């Protein structure tokens, strides 16, 4: 029996890495403006204040991902993060969703800088798609973030060469006449994450990026003096991560996670496979150290895992001993109890390394009954079913599976309520702007702020595309709405898949389609042969002959009611689509997409 530290509660830590971020709905054209008065935003008289700082979220305020914010003062603009969002149920077939930067189209010359807070794709992933449209302004980020951006940029051979400037802790950079920024380190599950103090003519704004508070082995919080130093500069507005605002308490210490992982490693009779996000580089580095202490060899599974570990080695964030990391092709040279594999696929992604192992499709790895599989990750909402199927497959083949719901082997990279309260009390902002996440997450973060003294009317809750004008002592949510509807990346196409295409894809997915091929005489307009009918995703024709007969009778009836010999093809297609559609709905209560094809001979 293995003795382990059990989780305090079954609540799942919401961890949202670059490669797998949960998302939802609505931004394919429409924009429902929230009621400012309901949000505590009390509009001031007047509009278009030329001396006000304009804050405009282009993404990340109604989803988790696609993080991108614009700060504008007179003729200068600074952009914070340019992230992507992963596809959702309502965007079938889409690769990514990226911020809509149409507002900046005529203001490209005003963009002085892009600041990237860290290397997760929900903060940097749209860089290759948007830099040319943004005029390729200078980018400011930390060393690791730069390396990840440049590595991904290699896949886009026609993209412009980036101007990236590396910043370090407490560096201060002047972007133009009105903007400067100071950088300070924050704890997250990827190294080199930076918070930003944006210094403007109306006051200092602080963005904490994605963050949590770290703890030592005794459970004492670390680096709080850094936050106190920020607060002493006088902060007008605090932009605060809302991803884990619904979670009570504080973060689980990474030291506890590492201790539990080591206990599991020591108890494993054979090979160990750790499924983990490839972006959790801090934990990956610690796992490698534990493996070295136990004399185990490290195998890396998944292209992203291999790439991220290599980048971290080059920069000195991961320092394995020579010979610790070996290619998967050499796995057979070592005994099973000397093997530890770090692999992608913790979310049940179909093409990831772990899923290929579970399905028996991996070239070098087959599941053995002595294998131990450890999921050092949380389940991203929407992925629960695929993760469960993955765990079932591994168990059926004899593998022993551990996950974060039964033992503390994962800690989120996002601050829960008590840590949010701590930061707010240390920073002492006049205004609180909850960022990152769905409205409910941000509303909860607003309540957290109010519980430690932020006035309700000073908590600014807005949606993507709304414009906030800030002065030294007030703010206003204007009536202006900036376009933030989805820009979708599908294969090589960027923005060419819009609302109409998505609606068609959803209709095909939900109801299927029916193709009706009608062959007519050009001279007489008479039907020359029995109509051909093709069904895909609607009904199986061989089992529904009576429906086929009804459709053909209806087509003959429609053509019989048309008296003129020459019939306009488009007019006939419309009639067939409408009347066959009504027939099918009456008989099946379903509305397949109907595609009439009229051939005149």
Image: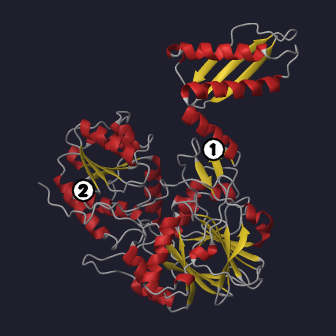
Dot in front, 2 or 1? 2
Q: Position of residue 53 (x, y in %)?
A: 69, 81
Q: Position of residue 427 (x, y in %)?
A: 48, 86
Which residue corresponds to the image point at 67% horizontal and 69% vertical from the top-left? 466
Residue at x 30% of width, y 36% of height: 366
Q: Nearer the viewer, residue 460 or 144?
A: 460
Give the percent coordinates (x, y) of residue 535: 59, 22
| Circle 2 Cα neighbour tier, 10 Å, few/some/many (<14 / 14–19 / ≥20) | some
Q: Is residue 537 visible?
A: no
Where is residue 13, by image quadrant? Answer: bottom left
| Residue 338, placed above or below residue 437 | above
Q: How many marks?
A: 2
Residue on which the image places disc 1: 490
In the displayed structure, 561 sits above or below 328; it is: above
Q: Is residue 65 left or right of residue 77?
A: left
Q: Residue furthest top?
A: 528
Q: Which residue is mark 2?
A: 406
Q: Earlier in the sequence, mark 2 or mark 1?
A: 2
Locate residue 412: give its quadrant: bottom left
Nearer to the camera, 219 or 279 = 219
The location of residue 514, given as percent across then percent down, is 63, 24
Can residue 202 be spotted in the picture?
yes
Q: Is residue 373 above or below residue 134?
A: above
Badge 1 marks a residue whose secondary structure is strand
Left or right: 285 in relation to 190: left
Q: Is residue 583 above or below residue 410?
A: above
**Quarter of the figure with residue 500:** top right
Q: Secondary structure at mark 2?
A: loop
Is 229 on the left or on the right of 35, as rendered? left
Q: What color scheme is it?
A: secondary structure
């Amino acid at each position: 029996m293995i003795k382990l530290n059990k989780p305090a509660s079954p609540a799942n830590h919401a961890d949202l890495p670059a490669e797998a971020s949960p998302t939802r709905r609505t931004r394919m054209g429409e924009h429902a403006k929230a009621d400012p008065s309901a949000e505590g935003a009390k509009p001031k008289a007047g509009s278009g204040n030329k001396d006000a700082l304009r804050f405009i979220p282009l993404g990340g305020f109604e989803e988790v991902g696609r993080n991108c914010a614009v700060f504008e003062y007179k003729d200068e603009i600074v952009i914070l993060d340019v992230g992507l969002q992963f596809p959702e149920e309502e965007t079938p077939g889409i690769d990514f969703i990226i911020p809509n930067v149409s507002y900046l189209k005529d203001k490209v010359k005003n963009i002085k800088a892009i600041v990237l807070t860290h290397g997760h794709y929900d903060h940097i992933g749209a860089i290759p798609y948007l830099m040319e449209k943004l005029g390729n302004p200078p980018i400011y980020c930390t060393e690791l973030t730069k390396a990840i951006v440049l590595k991904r940029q290699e896949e886009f051979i026609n993209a412009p060469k980036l101007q990236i400037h590396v910043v370090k802790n407490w560096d201060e950079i002047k972007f133009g006449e009105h903007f400067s920024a100071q950088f300070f380190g924050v704890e997250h599950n990827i190294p080199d994450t930076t918070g930003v103090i944006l210094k403007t003519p109306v006051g200092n704004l602080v963005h904490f990026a994605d963050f949590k508070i770290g703890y030592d082995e005794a459970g004492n919080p670390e680096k709080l003096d850094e936050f106190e130093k920020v607060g002493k500069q006088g902060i007008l507005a605090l932009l605060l991560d809302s991803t884990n605002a619904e979670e009570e308490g504080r973060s689980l210490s990474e030291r506890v996670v590492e201790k539990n992982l080591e206990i599991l490693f020591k108890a494993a009779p054979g090979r160990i496979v750790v499924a983990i996000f490839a972006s959790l580089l801090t934990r990956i580095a610690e796992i490698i150290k534990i493996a070295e202490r136990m004399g185990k060899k490290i195998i890396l599974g998944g292209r992203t895992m291999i790439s991220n570990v290599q980048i971290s080695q080059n920069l000195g964030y991961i320092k394995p001993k020579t010979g610790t990391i070996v290619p998967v092709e050499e796995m057979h040279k070592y005994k099973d109890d000397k093997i530890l594999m770090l692999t992608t696929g913790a979310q049940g992604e179909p093409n990831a390394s772990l899923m290929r192992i579970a399905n028996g499709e991996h070239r070098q790895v087959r599941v053995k009954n002595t294998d131990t599989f450890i999921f050092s990750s949380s389940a991203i909402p929407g992925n629960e079913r695929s993760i469960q199927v993955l765990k079932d497959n591994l168990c059926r083949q004899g593998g022993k599976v551990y996950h974060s719901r039964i033992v503390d082997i994962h800690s989120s990279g996002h601050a829960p309520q008590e840590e949010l309260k701590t930061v707010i009390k240390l920073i002492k902002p006049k205004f609180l702007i909850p960022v990152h996440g769905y409205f409910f997450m941000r509303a909860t973060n607003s309540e957290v702020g109010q519980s430690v003294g932020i006035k309700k009317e000073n908590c600014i809750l807005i949606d993507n595309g709304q414009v906030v004008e800030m002065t030294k002592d007030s703010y206003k949510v204007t009536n202006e709405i900036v376009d933030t509807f989805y820009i979708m990346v599908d294969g090589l196409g960027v923005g060419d898949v819009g609302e109409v295409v998505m609606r068609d894809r959803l209709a095909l997915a939900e109801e299927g389609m029916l193709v009706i091929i009608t062959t007519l005489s050009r001279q007489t307009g008479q039907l020359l042969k029995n109509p051909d009918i093709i069904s895909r995703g609607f009904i199986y024709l061989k089992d529904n002959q009576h429906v086929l007969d009804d459709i053909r009778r209806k087509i003959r009836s429609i053509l019989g009611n048309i008296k003129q010999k020459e019939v306009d093809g488009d007019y006939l297609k419309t009639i067939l689509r409408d009347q066959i559609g009504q027939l099918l709905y009456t008989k099946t209560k379903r509305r397949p997409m109907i595609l009439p094809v009229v051939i005149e001979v």
